Amino acid sequence: MVENRLVGIKSREIYEAPGAMCLYKAYNDLASLTLDKYTYQYLIGHVSNTYANLVYEGLWFSPLREALDAFNNNISKYINGTVRLKAIQR
């Protein structure tokens, strides 16, 4: 992908994290079954993207990141269960 970097230049990047993507998908599937519709939509529509952008831009110590952590910690009480993943080779 070609992206605009924080410092104002364009760069070509390749991002691969298959293990992380499997865990992310499993968590989202579990959250979709255990959270109410509006909380789940807010989580995947706003919280996830905002959190990723803050980390990418080096704003780990921002008050917004801490607030998003508090939101995630609060809803994590309601997200529990077992997800089984099966890796297949293609």
Image (cartoon, helix red, strand yellow):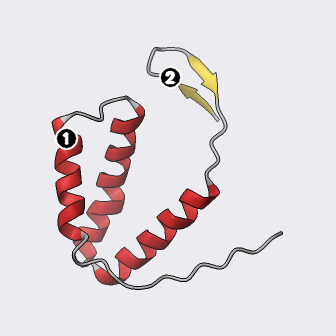
Q: Nearer the viewer, residue 39 or 54?
A: 54
Residue at screen point 38% across, 85% down: 81
**Alpha-carbon neighbours of circle 1 within 10 Å: few (<14), some, or many (≥20)?**
some
Query: What residue did someone put label 2 on?
Result: 5
Q: Nearer the viewer, mark 1 or mark 2?
A: 1
How far is the residue under mark 1 from the one under mark 2? 21 Å
Q: In the rendered image of this protein, does residue 27 appear above or below residue 11?
A: below
Q: Using residue 12 as the reference point, say whether residue 25 is left or right of it.
A: left
Name the spot of residue 87 as percent of width and height, x first: 70, 74
Which residue carries the number 1 mark?
64
Q: Residue at x 54, y 15 (%)?
A: 9
Q: Amino acid at mark 2?
A: Arg
Q: The N terminus is located in which quarter?
A: top right
Q: Is residue 9 left or right of residue 81?
A: right
Question: From the viewer's perspective, is 61 left or right of 4?
Answer: left
The quarter holding residue 36 reads: bottom left
Residue 70: % across, % down:
17, 55
Helix, strand or loop at mark 2: loop
How many numbered tags mark residues here? 2
Residue pushed farthest top?
8
* Observer-nearest of 42 and 16: 16
Q: Quadrant of residue 72?
A: bottom left
